[in-house]
Amino acid sequence: MTGPDLVDEPFRYPVLAEHERFRGAKWSVWSETVDIDGHVVVRDVLRHPGAVAVAAVDDQGRLLLIRQYRHPVGAFLWEIPAGLLDRAGEDPLECAKRELLEEAGVTARDWAALMTLALSPGGTSERIAIYRASGLTVDAGARPHTGEAEERELPQRWVTIPDAVARCFDGSFANATAVAAILALAAQSG
């Protein structure tokens, strides 16, 4: 079969006009008028600063999960530590190190890029860089208190990769970032 390479390719059709519809604390929503090969359409885009997540794996091969309330979906979700890039141009790896410490009181000696995801590319510019962290030092007392409501208490659980994979498929886990990271870890070890 011929055609384009089987790899995502950066490309943007011309934006003829844009209008900010909403500016929030972390992101904004814009209506963009786009010329797609002569078809002029309006697309609403949630502009997002980007995010990181950390698949922290201990010396026993267990993955760190935290439980966090997520208001938009009305649920407590089991997730891997994650957070937003705080400023334009922030180094994603440095952000990942900060988030692992802030959310879990964990530091890591070894870091590797695991994957980057476009979480909902039909509506948001958000991309999340996921890192694998190992060589962990766990000190829950080192976790700074951010004072933010959802991050005030983040219960932790260490789970084996096979157990985490099973929970992805039985519906126990719904967080897309966590599910992708779990399946990537399983693929790497299998």
Image (cartoon, rainbow, N blue to C red):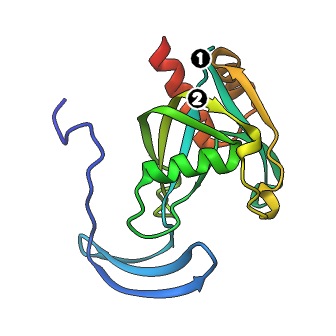
The three-letter code of the residue at mark 1 reads Asp
Q: Position of residue 77 (x, y in %)?
A: 77, 43
What quarter of the picture does the N terminus occupy?
Answer: top left
Callout 2: helix, strand or loop? strand
Apparent side of residue 51 relative to residue 113 in the rendered image (left or right): right
Residue that protrudes farthest toward the top in the picture = 190
Evaluate if marks 1 and 2 touch, with contact meaning CB atoms under 8 Å apart.
Answer: yes
Quarter of image, res 63: top right
Q: Position of residue 21 (x, y in %)?
A: 56, 86
Q: Is residue 114 above or below residue 99?
A: above
Instruction: Name the side, left or right, on which 39 lies relative to 172.
Output: left
Q: Is residue 165 left or right of residue 43?
A: right
Q: Label 1 neighbourhood size at 10 Å, few (<14), some (14-19), many (20+)?
A: few
62 vs 174: above or below: above
Q: Residue at x 30, y 46 (%)?
A: 8
Dot 1 or dot 2, earlier in sequence:
1
Tell me what residue is drawn at x 44 percent, y 48 percent. Answer: 93
Q: Name the residue carrying label 1.
A: 59
For residue 113, what is the image quadrant?
Answer: top left
* Relative height, residue 107 to residue 188 (above, below): below
Residue 35 in the image: state x and y as whole percent.
29, 76
For disc 2, the marked residue is 136
Asked whether the viewer can see residue 180, the reply is no
Percent of width and height locating residue 58: 61, 22
Tell me the quarter of the picture where residue 111 sits: top left
Compute the Cα span from label 1 to label 2: 8 Å
Front-lying residue, 189 or 104? 104
- 28 and 57: which one is in front? 57
Residue at 55% across, 77% down: 28
Looking at this view, is 179 or 13 the one in front? 179
Q: Amino acid under label 2? A: Leu
